[in-house]
Amino acid sequence: MKGCKLKKKVQALICMAGICGVVLNTGLSVHAADNTSDSRLRMSFAVMSDVHNDDVKFDKALKDIHNNIDPNYSALVLNGDIADEGKQSEYNNINMVLKNDAGIIPKTVIKNIGNHEFYDYSKGENTEDDSNQFLALSLNFEGQVHPYHDTWVNGYHFISLGSEKTYTKDMRDDCQAYLSDAQLNWFKNALTKNYRKGKPIFVFIHQPLDHSFFTTYDDCTQAIQQDAEVKAILANYPEIILFSGHTHYYLNDKDPNKKNFLPHLPGVDKGFAMVDSSSVHRPVNYGNSGAPYTPDKEKDVIGLSQGLFVQVYNDKVVIKGREFSNSTWIDGANFVVNYDNQYLNQ
């Protein structure tokens, strides 16, 4: 999250994530996690972000999932800031972990771009050529032609969006994402492919939407330059669960104004859900939400390493926050999106 600092008092969110029984407009509802029903598990997947080239914590997280959660999970999503700087040596390092752990991770590994993939700390602002070179390195690592791409996992649609340039003179700051018209049009079309009303769609982008999580109300506002356009597209699909990273905010905070899960955008009573995945490398705590931001408030929560594990049932999606450092579930970071009467038994 380098470059995006909160400076003023954080505004309280209207919606408290995790409230039981928040009913959405298409029969969807959000609850604290309850796995007492006889729902049938169809697949599971892991979401990690902000690895920042931390091969030790990354390896430990992969081993925790295989050894302690589900050795047969279907997909691993690496949602941006996989590298700390956009250097081939860092991609080689992460690829070595993936190669060494190939026997314990799924065949489907989805790699997405963040803002750190556009950084070289020895330089300042990127030229257009610099940004294009960083993008090319990331796409080679991802095995993709564009930073936006999709795939199907066990019949479920996984859609990735990603910045096409960052930290150039026309950008708001050094971490803002840029999504071209071509990407936005592709996204609109991708959402229509094999669409079934009420069936979950999983969308991933590193940077969070503006005025969503509490960290997006101040200096990190407009983390996506085309924020309004993205929201307009997402608004047509309440089935979507949007996964983002970037904030590093730790999943342990029980303050209702600082949750990493939102059933819909604050200020509206319906729509797609959003989840923030903290950080494998460096979860942070921004302190009291009622106090002004100062640099010393952004404190590493020493030793922690966090991400999400997602279970997809025939009638709901269960999202669990995981503490990889000690192989435990994070108390309070455990939510369900119910897809009531939408595609049951189909």
Image (spheres, rainbow, N blue to C red):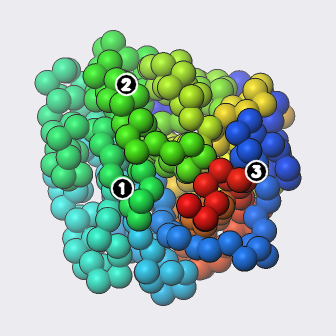
Q: Residue at x 41, y 65 (%)?
A: 154
Residue 106 seen in render: yes
Point out residue 12 in the picture as x, y percentages from the top left corner. Answer: 81, 31
What secondary structure is found at the residue carrying circle 3?
strand
Residue 294 seen in render: no
Q: Residue furthest bottom?
A: 67
The amino acid type of the residue labelled 1 equals Trp
Name which quarter of the figure residue 308 lies in.
Answer: bottom right
Label 2, label 1: how many angstroms apart (C-alpha)?
19 Å
**Front-most of residues 344 and 104:** 344
Q: Residue at x 70, y 68 (%)?
A: 330
Answer with mark 2 or mark 1, whichever residue precedes in sequence.
Answer: 1
Q: Residue at x 60, y 79 (%)?
A: 326
Name the residue tied to disc 3.
30
Q: Quadrant of the C terminus?
A: bottom right
The amino acid type of the residue labelled 2 equals Leu
Point out residue 338 in the picture as x, y percentages from the top left corner. Answer: 71, 55
Q: Mark number for residue 184?
A: 2
Point out residue 289 in the picture as x, y percentages from the top left corner. Answer: 79, 38
Name which quarter of the figure residue 40 lies in.
Answer: bottom right
Residue 310 relative to residue 184: left or right: right
Name the residue tied to disc 1.
152
Answer with mark 3 or mark 2, whichever residue precedes in sequence.
Answer: 3
Is 319 above or below relative to 244? below
Are circles 3 and 1 on residues that touch, CB within 8 Å?
Answer: no
The amino acid type of the residue labelled 3 equals Val
